[in-house]
Image (cartoon, grey):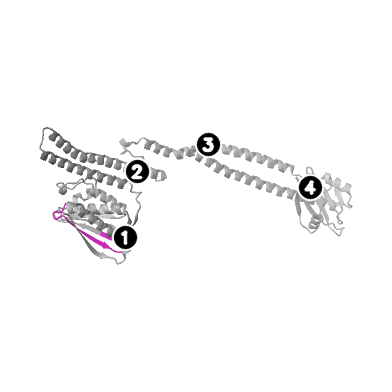
């Protein structure tokens, strides 16, 4: 069942239930009113009989019957029973209704007694006669045929009216749900018309500031992210293809030149060394690309554990110096908390070591002295690590792009590299819940600052 049908059904059921309760309330209160009015009428009828009895000079059945028949307000199926002071029945216009001693006592005490007897109403009152020591009791019994007929007619009217109203409510509910769902259907149609080729198209928000406008804005934000992701993927593929095509072209060129004629063993050895160098570069590029892809794929799947940041820093220092013995990494301790827990953070040790290694390797690579100075500070609210070199520096205008994949600063183009390390580092640091900032001055060096808040 679609939303439109569900809304119509729920709307019809809700309004139908309210109307049914309203109809039942009308029926119930009218029945209460009818019963009260009929009791009042029976009470008046009993008073009339009492007046007939009181007006007679001598009480006789024939006299009472005569006067009762002369009264114009005789009810259909009315039956009257009169009890004298000794609780004996002295008159009955029809079937005798025997009252219990409790009812007779209540009536003589002046209480108006009324109750139902099968489908008939019974009203019992007392009447005090001047000639008798104990009051007489008069019971009037009748069935409210006109009132019950009107009640049945009211029931039929309410039932038919409720059914007809239910049909009207269902039609109105269908129209209402159709109008309510129409904006959603329009959004669906617009989204279905957007594909990878026209992600720049947007969903019409409209002038209203409601949930549907918020939904349209959410779709537009998602489309913006998709468009950015598609552009980034396109650029990534283009850059990767270019970076891989260049060493492949060099390898093929080297092989073609070598195969053109017979060469000396020394020439072959030099050619193979060149091919090996290009192959190593390609292998490094592919590994970096895989690391980058892995951080993107597992951004929400990494399992963090409690690690000491300073220990990971020393592991990265050892790895850098093993990779290139000409590199020098000096770690300096600044303001360090006495509490060892202040040196710990939740993170992925392997990824964090990769980020530190990239920063150390870049600093050494682009510094004339092949040296990087690392400054570590740890307090109860922040761990700060600075990576400082005395290299060529980076222009401030390049700061917004320095962490983009495959971007390389103009001052570093003379050095071998692929522009992946800093992009990878940025994503790893962000995944750890930390931040990375850059400060640089041309000709004096560059400083990367990492800050790890407590969590």
The residue drawn where x is 23% and y is 41% is: 240
Q: Which mark sits nearer the N-terminus, 2 or 3?
A: 3
Q: Is residue 433 left or right of residue 83?
A: left
Q: Which mark sits nearer the N-terminus, 3 or 4?
A: 4
Quarter placement of the C terminus: bottom left
Q: Which one is in front, 262 or 15?
A: 262
Q: Which mark sits nearer the N-terminus, 3 or 1?
A: 3
Within 10 Å of disc 1 (Cα), the crowding (few <14, some 14-19, many 20+) is: many
**Mark 1 lies on residue:** 344
Q: Between tags 2 and 3, which lies in front?
A: 2
Marks 4 and 1, how far apart in space?
95 Å
Indicate the position of residue 327 as horizontal and vertical percent values: 17, 55
Marks 2 and 3, how far apart in space?
37 Å
Q: Between tags 3 and 4, which lies in front?
A: 3
Q: Which residues are magenta?
A: 366-384
97 to 179, vertically: above or below: below
**Mark 4 lies on residue:** 141
The residue drawn where x is 15% and y is 40% is: 272
């Amino acid at each position: 069942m679609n939303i439109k049908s569900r809304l119509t059904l729920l709307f019809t059921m809700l309004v139908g239930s309210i109307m049914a309760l309203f109809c039942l309330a009308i029926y119930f209160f009218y029945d209460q009113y009818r019963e009260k009015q009929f009791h009042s009428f029976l009470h008046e009828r009993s008073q009339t009989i009492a007046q007939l009895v009181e007006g007679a000079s001598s009480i006789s059945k024939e006299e009472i019957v005569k006067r009762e028949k002369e009264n114009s307000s005789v009810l259909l199926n009315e039956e009257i029973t009169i009890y004298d002071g000794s609780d004996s029945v002295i008159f009955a216009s029809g079937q005798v209704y025997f009252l219990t001693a409790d009812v007779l006592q209540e009536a003589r005490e002046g209480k108006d007694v009324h109750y139902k007897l099968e489908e008939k109403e019974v009203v019992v009152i007392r009447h005090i006669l001047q000639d008798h020591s104990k009051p007489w009791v008069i019971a009037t019994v009748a069935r409210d045929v006109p009132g019950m007929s009107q009640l049945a007619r009211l029931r039929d009217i309410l039932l038919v009216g409720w059914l007809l109203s239910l049909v009207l409510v269902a039609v109105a509910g269908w129209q209402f749900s159709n109008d309510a769902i129409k904006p959603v259907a329009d959004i669906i149609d617009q989204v279905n018309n957007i594909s990878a080729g026209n992600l720049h198209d947007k969903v019409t928000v409209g002038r209203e500031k409601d949930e549907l406008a918020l939904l349209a804005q959410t779709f537009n934000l998602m489309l913006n992210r998709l468009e950015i992701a598609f552009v980034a993927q396109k650029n990534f593929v283009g850059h990767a293809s270019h970076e891989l095509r260049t060493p492949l072209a060099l390898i093929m060129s080297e092989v073609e030149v070598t195969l053109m004629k017979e060469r000396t063993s020394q020439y072959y050895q030099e050619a193979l060394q060149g091919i090996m160098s290009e192959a190593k570069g390609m292998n490094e590029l592919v590994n970096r690309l895989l690391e980058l892809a892995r951080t993107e794929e597992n951004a929400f799947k990494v399992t963090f554990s409690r690690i000491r940041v300073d220990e990971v820093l020393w592991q990265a220092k050892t790895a850098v110096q093993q990779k290139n013995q000409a590199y020098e990494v000096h770690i300096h301790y600044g303001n360090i908390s006495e509490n060892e827990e202040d040196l710990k953070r939740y993170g992925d040790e392997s990824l964090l070591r990769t980020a530190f290694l990239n920063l150390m390797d870049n600093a050494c690579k682009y510094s004339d002295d092949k040296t990087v100075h690392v400054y570590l500070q740890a307090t109860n609210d922040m761990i700060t690590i600075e990576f400082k070199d005395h290299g060529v520096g980076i222009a401030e205008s390049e700061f917004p792009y320095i962490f983009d994949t495959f971007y390389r600063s103009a001052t570093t183009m003379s050095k071998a590299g692929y522009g992946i390390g800093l992009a990878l580092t940025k994503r790893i640091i962000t995944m750890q819940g930390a931040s990375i900032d850059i400060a640089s001055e041309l000709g004096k060096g560059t400083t990367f600052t990492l800050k790890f808040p407590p969590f």
